[in-house]
């Protein structure tokens, strides 16, 4: 099979972790007899520096011509510390999602037995936790009308959702619940927000179409509490953009490290596969960043973009073996030997080829 992959490393540690995912992708393709072609694209602060745009037209074209996008991270302290900046790296990520029609972000959260002790939560709470967070990506406050009034002293962000946006993300969530354990939790703030009342209304209209799925509803504050007091309750969780951004980062504490959580953003055009962590500029160039989330994102890429389940499973087995044998970066080493970013990538790739 011929695989066309757009490679967008981005900023900070992005290039280092994407390099490891490419090593692993090459190893899988070699083992299973696939041919792979990469096209490089700029996104984020590096794209602003080169072109003035955080998501240049050339990068968009590269993405649309590919079968999948392997993405690193965007962000730079130069922009974080400048509230007056008109162009920001993160705008590139939002533009990519909007222009590619990536309305759904899938974030699986699972635990690895050897690393349960790394979670800040008690072991008995997180052992066996296995959930899929589905976040709506192209609506809500992040894309609604925003601005300043009264000479800049009053600010507003508009949280707007259309029925079709809610229906398509809920359909996806019901379908994934059917593939898993048949339990869907719709997270909203329907006691306060009109937009959330639309979400709940549409979900209640759709639920009878999925009689094999147990559907329940939870306010976002309660869901945030439940994630850290009883995460085993959840199977599939679906929510709007802003809530999903916050809850999925909170859920990273279940596995013990954001460096273990992969994600897929899918929708109308080419899907994007990326770790949930940021650009971590403090570690950039030091060869210490954990590449496993990006490598697991490559596993999702094989599974979701190419429907190659065995290839994805081969990556997952190699990652699990690296954790079991202690071939991990310093964030997971627990005082033992800490491997570099590239050493972990090399080990996982070589494990696949055995």
Image (spheres, rainbow, N blue to C red):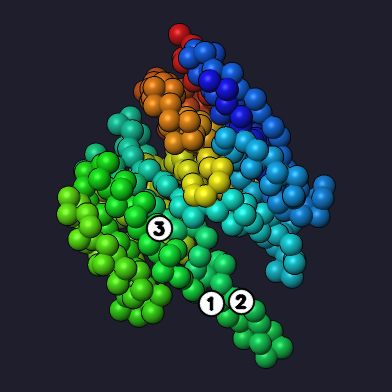
* Contact between labelled residues 3 and 1, with CB atoms less than 8 Å apart: no
| Number of the label disc, if any, that sits on residue 255 | none
From mark 3 to mark 2, how far is it between C-alphas? 25 Å
Q: Secondary structure at mark 3?
A: helix
Q: Residues within 10 Å of mark 3 (few under 14, many from 20)?
A: some
Q: Nearer the viewer, mark 3 or mark 2?
A: 3
Q: Does residue 274 lie above or below 354 as drawn?
A: below
Residue drawn at x 30%, y 79% as measured from the top left:
191
Q: Find the residue positioned furthest to the bottom.
A: 150
Tell me residue 98's x, y (percent).
59, 57
Residue 177, placed above or below residue 331? below
Considering only order in the chain, which callout, 2 or 3, is on the residue closer to the N terminus? Answer: 2
Residue bearing the label numbered 1: 158
Q: Position of residue 94 (x, y in %)?
A: 60, 57
Count of all numbered marks drawn on residues in the image: 3
Tell which circle, 1 or 2, labels the residue nearer the N-terminal end: 2
Separation of marks 1 and 2 at Cα, in angstroms: 6 Å
- Pick the residue in front: 58 or 254: 58
Instruction: Provide the secondary structure element on which disc 1 rests.
Output: loop
Residue contact at pointers 3 and 2, CB within 8 angstroms:
no
Q: Quadrant of the C terminus?
A: top left
- For the residues bearing labels 1 and 2, Cβ distance under 8 angstroms: yes
Q: Is residue 309 left or right of residue 343?
A: left
Few, some or many C-alpha atoms within 10 Å of disc 1 (few <14, some 14-19, many ≥20)? few
Instruction: Specify the label residue 168 is tagged with.
Output: 3
Q: Secondary structure at mark 2?
A: strand
Q: Please state the horizontal and vertical placement of residue 280, each as a whole percent of the image.
A: 61, 46
Quarter of the view holding residue 130: top left
The residue at which mark 2 appears reads as: 146
| Residue 70 visible in the displayed image | no
């Amino acid at each position: 099979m011929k695989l066309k992959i757009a490679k967008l490393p981005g900023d900070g540690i992005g290039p280092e972790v994407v390099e490891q995912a490419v090593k692993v992708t090459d190893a899988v393709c070699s083992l299973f007899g696939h041919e792979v072609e990469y096209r490089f694209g700029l996104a984020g602060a590096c794209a602003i520096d080169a072109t003035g745009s955080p998501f240049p037209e050339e990068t968009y074209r590269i993405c649309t011509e590919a079968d999948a996008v392997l993405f690193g991270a965007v962000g730079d302290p130069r922009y974080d510390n400048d509230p007056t900046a008109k162009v920001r790296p993160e705008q590139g990520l939002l533009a990519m999602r909007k222009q590619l029609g990536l309305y759904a972000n899938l974030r699986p959260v699972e635990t690895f037995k050897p690393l349960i002790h790394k979670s800040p939560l008690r072991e008995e709470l997180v052992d066996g936790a296995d959930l899929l967070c589905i976040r709506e990506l192209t609506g809500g406050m992040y894309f609604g009308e925003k601005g300043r009034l009264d000479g800049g002293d009053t600010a507003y962000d508009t949280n707007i959702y259309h029925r079709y946006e809610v229906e398509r993300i809920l359909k996806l969530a019901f379908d994934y619940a059917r593939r898993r354990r048949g339990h869907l939790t719709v997270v909203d703030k329907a006691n306060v927000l009109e937009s959330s009342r639309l979400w709940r209304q549409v979900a209640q209209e759709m639920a009878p179409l999925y009689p094999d799925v147990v559907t329940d509803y939870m306010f976002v504050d309660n869901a945030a509490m439940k994630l850290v007091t009883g995460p085993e309750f959840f199977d599939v969780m679906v929510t709007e953009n802003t809530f999903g951004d916050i809850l999925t980062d909170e859920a990273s504490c279940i596995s013990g490290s954001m460096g273990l959580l992969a994600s897929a953003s899918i929708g109308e055009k080419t899907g994007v596969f990326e770790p949930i962590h940021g650009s971590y500029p403090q570690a950039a160039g030091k060869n210490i960043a954990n590449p496993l989330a990006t490598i697991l994102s490559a596993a999702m890429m094989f599974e979701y973009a190419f429907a190659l389940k065995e290839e994805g499973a081969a990556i997952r087995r190699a990652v699990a073996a690296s954790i079991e044998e202690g071939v991990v970066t310093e964030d997971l080493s627990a005082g033992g030997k800490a491997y570099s970013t590239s050493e972990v990538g090399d080990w996982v790739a070589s494990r696949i080829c055995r």
